[in-house]
Amino acid sequence: MSTIFQKIIDKQIPADIVYEDDRCLAFRDINPQAPTHVLVIPKRAIRSVAELEASDADLIGYLFVVVRKIAEQEGLSNGYRTVINSGRDGGQTVDHLHIHLLGGRGLAWPPG
Ligand code: DGP
């Protein structure tokens, strides 16, 4: 079943896109939890970390390189947090793997 993120990839619904290439897309979260809250997603539909295969390793590593580029682009020189929610207990609400990039304020730990 097509997720809302697939519709964003396919440009069927709009998003505030901050980065795009052939393998991934990054756009601002619709419900930001920090001054910078960007979601970095693979264009290939992988549902969650729980469904990763060994052959996905390069792609997942690449997504984090993109995170680093966007963090620089966003001026997050004081640091930032990356989060991947997985499954129901992990708080995942969209079944298309995504990395949250949060920054622009001090972030508390531990998370709820
Ligand atoms: P998670 O709970 O980890 O599955 O995060 C899903 C995030 O996706 C959540 O922070 C809100 C965001 N989101 C959901 N629908 C949309 C949408 O249509 N557009 C954008 N930009 N973000 C969305």
Image: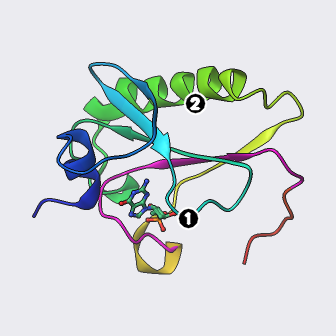
Q: In the figure, residue 32 lies in which quadrant?
A: bottom right
Q: Quadrant of the N terminus?
A: bottom left
CB at disc 1 and ligand 1 closer than 8 Å: yes
The residue that appears at 13% across and 59% down in the rendered structure is 2
Per the rendered image, the range of residues in magenta is 91-106
Q: 1 or 26: nearer the eye?
A: 26
The residue that appears at 49% across and 59% down in the rendered structure is 30
What residue is pinned by disc 2?
67
Which amino acid type is shown beneath numbered disc 2? Val
Q: Which mark is residue 49?
A: none
CB at disc 2 and ligand 1 closer than 8 Å: no
Whether residue 62 sits left or right of residue 37 in the image: it is left
Q: Tell which quarter ligand 1 is in.
A: bottom left
Please say whether residue 31 is one of the residues in the magenta stretch.
no
Give the dominant element type of the magenta stretch: helix, strand or loop: loop
What residue is pinned by disc 1?
31
12 in relation to 74, above or below: below
Number of residues whose C-alpha sits closer than 10 Å to that of mark 1, classed few (under 14), some (14–19) or many (20 or more): few
Whether residue 29 sits left or right of residue 95 in the image: it is right
Residue 31 on image: x %, y % = 55, 64
Whether residue 84 sits left or right of residue 51 in the image: it is right
- Nearer-N-terminus badge (2/1): 1
Q: Quadrant of the C terminus?
A: bottom right
Please say whether residue 98 is one of the residues in the magenta stretch.
yes
Which amino acid type is shown beneath numbered disc 1? Asn
The residue that appears at 24% across and 40% down in the rendered structure is 9
Residue 55 on image: x %, y % = 26, 30
63 in relation to 92, above or below: above
Query: What distance separates the C-alpha of mark 2 from that of mark 1?
Result: 19 Å
